[in-house]
Amino acid sequence: MAGVTAKDIAKKLGISTASVSVALNNKPGVSRETRARVLEAARAMGYAPPRAAEGQTICFVIYLDEAVGIAQESNFYTFVLQGVEAAAKELGYRVLIRYFYASLDFSEQLEDILPDLAGMIVLGTDFTAARRREIAGLIDAALPFPVVVADSFVCSAYVDCVGNDNLYGAKSAMSYLIDQGHRRFCYLRARQRIANFDDREHGIRMALSEHLGEAGSLTTLEVDIAAEGAYRELLEKMDPRNLPDAFFAENDVVAAAAIRALRALGVQVPEAVSVMGFDDIPVCELVEPALTTVHAFKETLGAEAMGLLHRRIARGQTIRDAQATGLIKLSLSTRIVPRRSVAPPGMVK
C-alpha cells in the first residue's frame, strides 16, 4: 500500500497513533507485545519510514507574470521564502532559488536543474485563471518529484497548495471597519487581477451585504498595483470634497499609496477618512499614520509548504501520487492588526 502512515497502522490495530509512533521509533512507552504487533503490521502493510533529507535539494520557484507584476512589486514573497528556508534547514534540505517567467519556455528555464531536485515549491502569487494552461507546464504531473504551490489555490485541483484565507481575511477586515462605525466605503481595486484579489473582493462584498445590506455603500477606484502608479492615479481620482468613511485597499502597497495621496491633497488620516490594507508588510509601519491591516502569516505559509513538501518527499510521492492519494489544500487564517490609520468617523486621535 503506497503512502502508508502511522495513522493507517493505528486504525488497523485499533490503538493510538502515538503508540504506533513510539513502537516504530523504538522508544519506551508501549509493551513488548504491542511493539511486535505494530512492527508486524507495518511490514505487512508496506510501511516505509520517512527518509531523512540527507542534503537533498529543493527549489523555491518565484513565478513572475509581467502582465501582473504583483510578486515583483511587493516583498511579500521574501517572508514566505524565510519560512521555507528555516524549515528546510531544520529538515536538512538545501534550497535553490529560481525565477520563472510566464512568458518564457518552461524547459529552458528549469530543465538544467530538474535532475538534481527532490521537490519544488512554487510561489503562485502571480497565478491567474487565464494563465492556467501555461502554468500546467510548471506543475506537470509527469515530474519525478512532488510540487507544492504557495500563496495561490488556482491549481488546487492538480497539485498541493498552501495559502492564506483571503476571502475571510477581507470579510473580517470589512467587519472591523463596520464595527468602528463606518458605513460608506471605497474599495481600492488593483487593475491587475489575481485569484487572491478576487477572493478579497468577494469577502468585502460578503461582509457589507451581511452586516449593512442597503444601509451600506461601496464605490470602487481601480488603480495600478505599483506604488508610484497607484499614488499618481489616486491623486487624480480622489475628490477631497466627497470622501467615503473608509478606504479598503487590496494590499498594503496600494493602501500606503492612498495615505500618501490623501496627505498630498490635504486630507488627514484617520480624522477625515480611515484607510485599511492587507498583508502586513513592513511598509505598514513606515507610512504616517501607521497602517491598520490584515496580517497574513507569511513565514508560516512558507514553513507549512516546506513541511508538506517534505512529507511527500519522505514517502517517495510525485505529483501524480499526490493526486491519487488525495491532494492537500491548506488555508491559513489571518488576523487584524489595529494601528493608527483607522478610527471611528469623526474621532480625532
Image (spheres, rainbow, N blue to C red):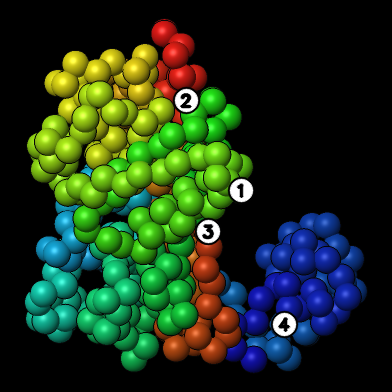
Residue under pointer 4: 42
Q: Nearer the viewer, mark 2 or mark 4?
A: 2
In this view, the residue in front, 171 or 157, is 171
Q: Nearer the viewer, mark 1 or mark 3?
A: 1
Res 291 → quadrant: top left
Q: Secondary structure at mark 4?
A: helix
Q: Earlier in the sequence, mark 1 or mark 3?
A: 1
In this view, the residue in front, 286 or 174, is 174
The percent position of residue 242, horizontal first and vertical second, equals: 29, 28
Q: Is residue 165 above or below residue 11?
A: above
The percent position of residue 107, horizontal first and vertical second, equals: 15, 84
Q: Nearer the viewer, mark 4 or mark 3?
A: 3
Residue under pointer 3: 331
Res 238 → quadrant: top left
- Distance in Å between CA atoms under marks 3 and 2: 23 Å
Q: Secondary structure at mark 1?
A: helix
- Residue lying at 37% horizontally and 88% vertically, measured from the top left: 141
- Residue lying at 34% horizontally and 91% vertically, measured from the top left: 142
Tag shown at residue 210: 1
- Distance in Å between CA atoms under marks 1 and 2: 22 Å
- Distance in Å between CA atoms under marks 4 and 3: 32 Å
Quarter of the image that includes the N terminus? bottom right
Q: Earlier in the sequence, mark 4 or mark 3?
A: 4
Residue under pointer 2: 338
Tag shown at residue 258: none
Q: Secondary structure at mark 3?
A: strand
Graded by Cα atoms within 10 Å as few (under 14), some (14 to 19) or many (20 or more), the crowding at tag 1 reads few
